[in-house]
Amino acid sequence: MRAAHLESLSSRLALITAGSAAIAAADDGDLGLFEEALAVPDAERWQFDRARIQLAMVSDCGAPAR
């Protein structure tokens, strides 16, 4: 997704791209990618996609949702 630069097309695709990267790397227990995904500008507009990323963050890393 990042190679195709989908994040440059819309804020929703930026959120999904960053969230997908965070979920794929969740085995490392690193919250940084999740926090980066949730900090995408206009992320709050896409409530369902944002909630999916938050759920993945909580279930994969055991971190509290933000």
Image (cartoon, rainbow, N blue to C red):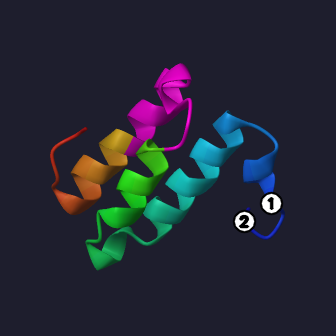
Which residue is found at the position 22% from the left and 40% from the top? 65
Q: In which quarter of the image is the N terminus?
A: bottom right
Residue highlighted by disc 2:
2
Q: Quadrant of the C terminus?
A: top left
Question: In the shown orientation, is residue 33 left or right of residue 64?
Answer: right
Question: In the shown orientation, is residue 24 left or right of residue 60?
Answer: right
Q: Marks 1/2: CA distance?
A: 5 Å
Question: Can you say whether 28 is above or below 17 in the image?
Answer: below
Report x, y in % for residue 29: 25, 72
**What kind of element bears circle 1?**
loop
Type of amino acid at the residue the image marks with label 1: His
Type of amino acid at the residue the image marks with label 2: Arg
The foreground one among 61 and 12 is 12
Report x, y in % for residue 44: 47, 25
Question: Can you say whether 3 is above or below 10 in the image?
Answer: below
Q: Residue 5, labelled with which disc?
A: 1
**What kind of element bears circle 2?**
loop
Q: In which quarter of the image is residue 54?
A: top left
Which residue ends up furthest to the bottom in the rendered image? Answer: 28
Q: Are marks 1 and 2 in contact (CB under 8 Å)?
A: yes
Q: In which quarter of the image is residue 23?
A: bottom left
Extent of the magenta region: 40-53
Rate crowding at label 1 as few (under 14), some (14 to 19) or many (20 or more) other CA atoms within 10 Å: few
Type of secondary structure dominating the magenta stretch: helix
Which residue is found at the position 40% from the left and 32% from the top? 51
Q: In which quarter of the image is residue 45?
A: top right
In the rendered image, residue 46 lying in the magenta stretch gets the answer yes
Which residue ends up furthest to the front in the rendered image? Answer: 41
Which residue is found at the position 45% from the left and 62% from the top? 22
In the rendered image, residue 50 lying in the magenta stretch gets the answer yes
The foreground one among 18 and 41 is 41
